Image: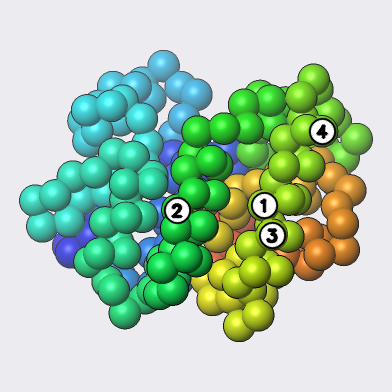
Amino acid sequence: MAAIQLVIGDKAYSSWSLRPWLALKMIGVPFEEIRIKLRRPETRAEILRHSPSGKVPLLKHKGVELWESLAILEFLAETYPAAHLWPEDAAARARARAVSSEMHAGFAPLRQHMSMDVTRDLRGQGMGEGVASDIARIEEIWSGCRAAYGAGGPYLFGHFTAADAMYAPVATRFVTYGTTLSRASAAYRDAIMALPAMKEWIAAAKREVA
């Protein structure tokens, strides 16, 4: 058994599962993946066998159990400091935590009208009330982080961080719904989607629904 187990939902739909899964892949730490099918009568009971919240993801590591994505990312950052899941610079680290928390707590219209589904082409759909404002704010976050801290690489803070893990599901939504983005935002979206781990996730999602 791997030292880390990660309980996740369907890869097609589970944006919260993608975040810690992607971080673990980017860190390069072996882990056991336990997948639970969502949207079924038995789903909640199956999840409750692992997670007291009745939700995925859940991480298990040497007696520690964590059932919330951002807390899992914080734990991974502390457990594997060499991975630099948070930027080393204090100001950049504070910004990364702020934008990650904003993603965690906000953007309800985007979540409602542009739900994650990496297996479908839904171009032209999803622009419900409030979505345009959410997209504009996300683009503002991306461009601001890239301009201030992104000189060292293609990600929000140069190298891959927890903030990129938090926004990766948004990148998939912008592909699924064919969202028109600025050149800078499109380049960042493409950098996330080009990650081998993202390609692995999407290929597995397509196999799940085949």
Is residue 119 visible from the viewing direction of this image?
Answer: no
Q: Which label was assigned to residue 97?
A: 2
- Which residue corresponds to the image point at 69% horizontal and 31% vertical from the top-left? 110
Do callouts 3 and 2 mark residues in contact (Cβ within 8 Å)? Answer: no
Q: Secondary structure at mark 1?
A: helix
Check disc 1 and report the residue beneath it. Answer: 141
Q: Secondary structure at mark 4?
A: helix
Q: Is 29 displayed left or right of 105 in the figure? A: left
Do callouts 4 and 1 mark residues in contact (Cβ within 8 Å)? Answer: no
Q: Is 72 displayed left or right of 209 in the figure? A: left
Q: Earlier in the sequence, mark 4 or mark 3?
A: 4
Give the CA separation, mark 3 to mark 2: 14 Å
Do callouts 1 and 3 mark residues in contact (Cβ within 8 Å)? Answer: yes
Check disc 3 and report the residue beneath it. Answer: 144
Residue lying furthest front: 91
Q: Earlier in the sequence, mark 2 or mark 1?
A: 2
Give the CA separation, mark 4 to mark 2: 24 Å
Q: Earlier in the sequence, mark 4 or mark 2?
A: 2
161 shown above or below 75: below
Task: Tell me which corner region of the image, top left, top right, bottom left or bottom right, holds residue 146.
Answer: bottom right
Give coordinates of residue 11: x percent, y percent: 53, 46
Q: Which label was assigned to residue 153?
A: none
Residue type indicated by callout 1:
Ile
Q: Nearer the viewer, mark 4 or mark 1?
A: 1
Q: Earlier in the sequence, mark 3 or mark 2?
A: 2
Q: Residues within 10 Å of mark 3 (few under 14, many from 20)?
A: some
Residue type indicated by callout 4:
Ala
Do callouts 4 and 3 mark residues in contact (Cβ within 8 Å)? Answer: no
Check disc 4 and report the residue beneath it. Answer: 132
